């Protein structure tokens, strides 16, 4: 861990993962099978020995059928200087704007990609859609076998219940995404 903020996020993610596993009676083996993340890595995350990348955290959330933001909104995360729910990867910054709300069935993020970074996302649950608004730069989204380019000031909606990729096309791209879960399961938190 690099600093206190990283330690707090690792702790938040660790505690949330343990709580979900306990609530559902899941072993690390079963969790690994559901998420596609190795048992060893899940164990390291739970022991705060490793902090997952955004891509790994998305795989965990999708496999467990919980919202991504549910890992970033634990009580202990509220005191972070950058604000609730900020998480960093080398060329990707994600800030939670609205945490998942079961009654509204959505969560919203402010995402910045830099250095022409391409981010792979696993398929979300069936029926999930993403609503994108590009604030600056140019965003490429790969879905259904083709790239779609969204310019600053433009919006686009796509079915996110299949693998998809985001790519910064100009060196820095900032966009808002609202993820809508119309068929939120009883497991969704």
Image (spheres, rainbow, N blue to C red):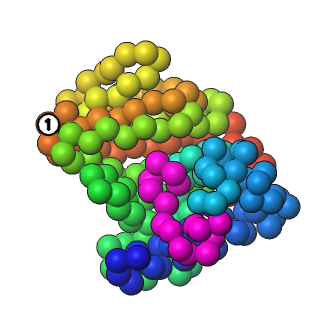
Establish if 145 lies above or below 159: above
For image coordinates 56% across by 34% down, the residue present is 123
Q: In this view, does 160 lie to the left or right of 87?
A: right
Q: Is residue 112 above or below residue 116?
A: below
Using the image, determine if residue 104 lies above or below residue 87. Answer: above
Q: What stretch is highlighted in magenta?
A: 42-57
Residue 35 image offset from top left, x and y in percent: 65, 46
How many callouts does the rendering have?
A: 1
**Residue 144 percent across, percent down from the top left:** 47, 17
Residue 148: in magenta span = no
* Occupied quadrant, residue 11: bottom right
Residue 38: x percent and y percent? 63, 52
The residue tagged 1 is: 170
Residue at (81%, 58%) from the top-left corner?
26
- In depth, the one of 158 and 165 nearer the eye is 165
Residue drawn at (44%, 53%) of the image: 54
Quarter the C terminus occupies? bottom right
Q: In which quarter of the view is residue 4 placed?
A: bottom left
Q: Where is residue 177 in the image (x, y as percent from the top left)?
A: 39, 43
Q: Is residue 21 visible?
A: yes
Q: Is residue 152 visible?
A: no
Q: Residue at x 58, y 67 (%)?
A: 45
Q: Which of 15 and 39 is in front in this view?
A: 39
Indicate the quadrant containing the N terminus: top left, top right, bottom left or bottom right: bottom left
Dot 1 falls on a residue whose secondary structure is loop
């Amino acid at each position: 861990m690099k600093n206190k903020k990283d330690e707090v996020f690792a702790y938040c993610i660790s505690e949330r993962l343990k709580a979900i596993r306990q609530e559902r009676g899941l072993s690390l083996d079963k969790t690994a099978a559901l998420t596609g993340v190795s048992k060893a890595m899940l164990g390291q995350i739970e022991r705060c020995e490793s902090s997952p990348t955004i891509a790994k955290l998305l795989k965990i959330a999708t496999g467990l059928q919980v919202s991504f933001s549910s890992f970033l909104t634990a009580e202990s995360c509220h005191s972070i200087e950058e604000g609730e729910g900020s998480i960093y990867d080398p060329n990707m910054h994600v800030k939670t704007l609205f945490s998942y709300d079961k009654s509204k069935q959505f969560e919203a993020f402010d995402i910045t990609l830099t250095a022409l970074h391409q981010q792979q996302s696993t398929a979300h649950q069936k029926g999930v859609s993403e609503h994108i608004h590009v604030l600056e730069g140019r965003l490429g989204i790969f879905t259904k076998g083709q790239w779609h380019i969204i310019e600053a000031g433009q919006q686009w909606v796509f079915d996110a219940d299949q693998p998809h990729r985001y790519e910064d096309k100009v060196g820095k791209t900032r966009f808002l995404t609202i993820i809508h879960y119309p068929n939120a399961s009883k497991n969704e938190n």
